[in-house]
Amino acid sequence: MSTRLLLALGIVSCALFAQTPPRYEVDPTWPKPLPEDWTWGRLGGICVDSHDHVAVVDRRDISDEEAETSHRAPPIVIFDAAGTVIKSMGDPDKVPGSIHGCFFDREDNVWVGGNNDGIIQKYSHDGKLLMQIGKRGVFDTSDGTRRGKLNNASHEQFFLPAGIAIDPGNGDIYVADGYGNRRVAVFDKTGKFLRQWGRQATEQETRDGAPGAFAQLVHCIALGNDGLLYVCDRQGDRVQVFDKMGNFKRNIWIRTGAATLPDPRGTAWWVAFSIDPEQKFMYVMNGRNEQVHILDHASGKILSSFGRPGHQLGSFIHGHTIAFDSKGNLYVAETDNGRRIQKFKVVASR
């Protein structure tokens, strides 16, 4: 066999390998038991810092029966890499209502929002409140209440924000706003409003995949190494991709849900990327089908999936948000009736 042919075969083999996603298995030893008599409510988000500490945000909405024998876990709980609780923070009366989403910036400050509030907050790693945009309990609506008509316009308030991403270069704050509004709102590192984009989609626009129009929940936002923003149009069964100025680039469809759009539950719940610099794989938490999809980042094609509905290890009930640590372990937080976190380790490539 000629050297040229061997080289060609090697290039093809490498290309195929590059598109082969890893396989995962659940780690049944992670996390360790919670301290004392803590009990989780619905878990609204999960994120990982530069030390592979894993933060989970908890809505603390345990049942009356559970409250007879247990205590609510704190709003923000941080585990070390081994799964042991090392820290907790957040005043339950001051964190965003129905805490939702979680993001560590490059200084390991943790950012949170709330899908029953009009604020986002930034905490130091030691739990000190460093910044708040908005006034707690006030919403970007016609009358400032949750029942008011959405404005989709405020420079100071949100309407049920779902996710946050921070630009590591200049500290700009990108907010998926969210459960009430239909926009991405952008602020500088001091909290000054810069710009926004997004609006309510018609049913036809949802079916057509119209740029910058959202079917219902603007449920997540992630900033890729490519400098683009990936925004979950949950009931539109797609991830919309924009540049930092809000210019639409493409749709990544997750059409595994309802036959027609909008999809009542939706498939595009959360986004994360593989840890290689090129981020060859894109991961989508599909809480409708209770699966994690692994996509080819470049093409948006679903390459493989894992998970199924259920309470057993490795299955999901309301799989909600996902995050990676520096070793490529994937963490999934479940909300509603799931109320747990699971760690998935890479076992091999097919």
Image: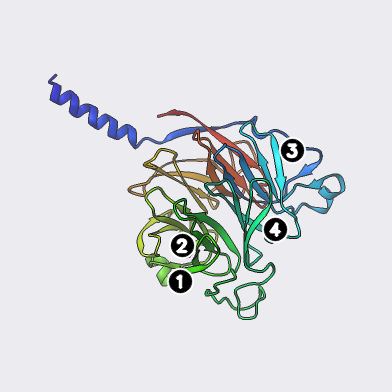
**Residue 98, position in %: x, y?**
68, 59
Mark 2 → mark 1, Cα distance in angstroms:
9 Å
Question: Which residue is more in the foreground, 294 or 110?
Answer: 110
**Residue 309, position in %: x, y?**
58, 45
Q: Point out which mark residue 95 bears.
A: 4
Q: Secondary structure at mark 2?
A: helix
Q: Which residue is mark 3?
A: 34
Mark 3 → mark 2, Cα distance in angstroms:
37 Å
Mark 4 → mark 3, Cα distance in angstroms:
21 Å
Q: Secondary structure at mark 3?
A: loop
Marks 1, 3: nearer the viewer: 3
Q: Which residue is mark 1?
A: 201
**Which residue lies most toward the right here?**
68
Mark 2 → mark 4, Cα distance in angstroms:
30 Å
Marks 2, 4: nearer the viewer: 4
Q: Which residue is mark 2?
A: 236
